[in-house]
Amino acid sequence: MNFPNFPPDFGSPPLLTAAAQMQGKRLPPAPPWLIFCPQASLLRHAVKRWRGKRVPGFFGETYLLTKSDNRVAVAGGFGVGAPIVGVLVEMFAIWGVSRFVWLGIAGGLQPELQTGDLVLGETAVRDEGTSHHYLPSEPTVASSTSLTESVAQAISQAKLPYQKGATWTTDAPYRETAAAVAYYQQQGVQTVEMEVAALLAVARYCQKEAAALLAVSDSLAGGVWQTAVPAQLPEQRLAQALDALVQVAKEQSL
């Protein structure tokens, strides 16, 4: 059986569109950058540190960061998984956002990865459903080269060590089997999460840029699931990365 079950015709117009759902919403001018903050503590940090002003009309919570000179918005509280991220990317693109960055936690697949290590995603394995409705079905989807380099520049300036690599996006965290983990380890894939492939694919479909920076939390590298120790470190690293990204976005407006 092919996937999706009904092969998509990418030239055929959808009946329900983000543009239709956005019609009539009274929104402020869109920022060029939007940072997804799936962890609640990261969203709180962004809103407090950069003085977030709530923007209604989107799933979850969206804030325009006024201390970024309104160049960055953040989104969180929208739940888990690829479908909601795809919906939000389309809605934010209609609003006028052009650059999307995902700052989230992920499971480590390689034994050398430690709690809190940062991985800048160059590609994502498309083991979820959403991306295949937006782009022809290929094994992986790549991040935006220019935006990935901007993220790399920001976190380097903040003296945050990182490595580049691939991430495995799956819809089924309780089906991350020993065989699958061993396979992706052998392929050199660094991390596993549930959203990045959809983010990259939908952004490309919308002709926007997208990148992902992941902080290792738990680990599956030894064939046994191990929780993060210390638990707070991944989100602390992401908060530092967010501050660096907002600063770069501000500088680009000068």
Image (cartoon, rainbow, N blue to C red):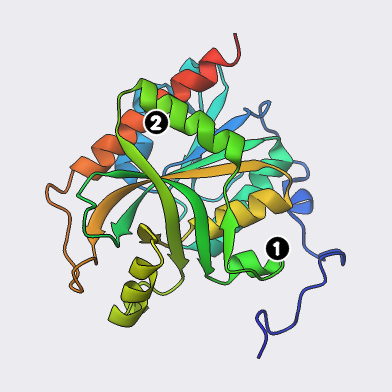
Relative to residue 68, is residue 103 depicted above or below? below
Above/below status of 186 relative to 191: below
Residue at image position (59%, 46%) is 58
Query: Crowding near pointer 1: few (<14 within 10 Å), some, many (20+)?
Result: some
The amino acid on which the numbered mark 1 sits, given as a three-letter code, is Tyr
**In the image, is residue 100 above or below residue 3?**
above
Residue at the left extreme of this rendering: 230
In the figure, is residue 241 to the left or right of 121? left
The secondary element bearing badge 2 is classed as helix
What residue sits 18% from the left and 69% below the top?
A: 222
Q: Is residue 125 visible?
A: yes
**Amino acid bearing label 2:** Leu
Residue neighbourhood size for the residue with mark 2, other residues' Cα within 10 Å, grouped as few (<14), some (14–19), many (≥20): many
Picture residue at 26% right of the left edge, 44% below the top = 117
7 to the left or right of 39: right
Q: Which of 159 and 237 is in front in this view?
A: 159
The residue lying at 17 percent from left, 60 percent from top is 227
Total number of numbered labels?
A: 2
Which residue is at the front of the view, 181 or 171?
181
Where's residue 18, x and y in %? Answer: 73, 53
Residue 95: percent from the left, percent from the top?
70, 38
Q: Mark 2 points at which residue?
A: 242
- Could you say whether the residue bearing mark 1 is in a helix, strand or loop? loop
Residue bearing the label numbered 1: 134
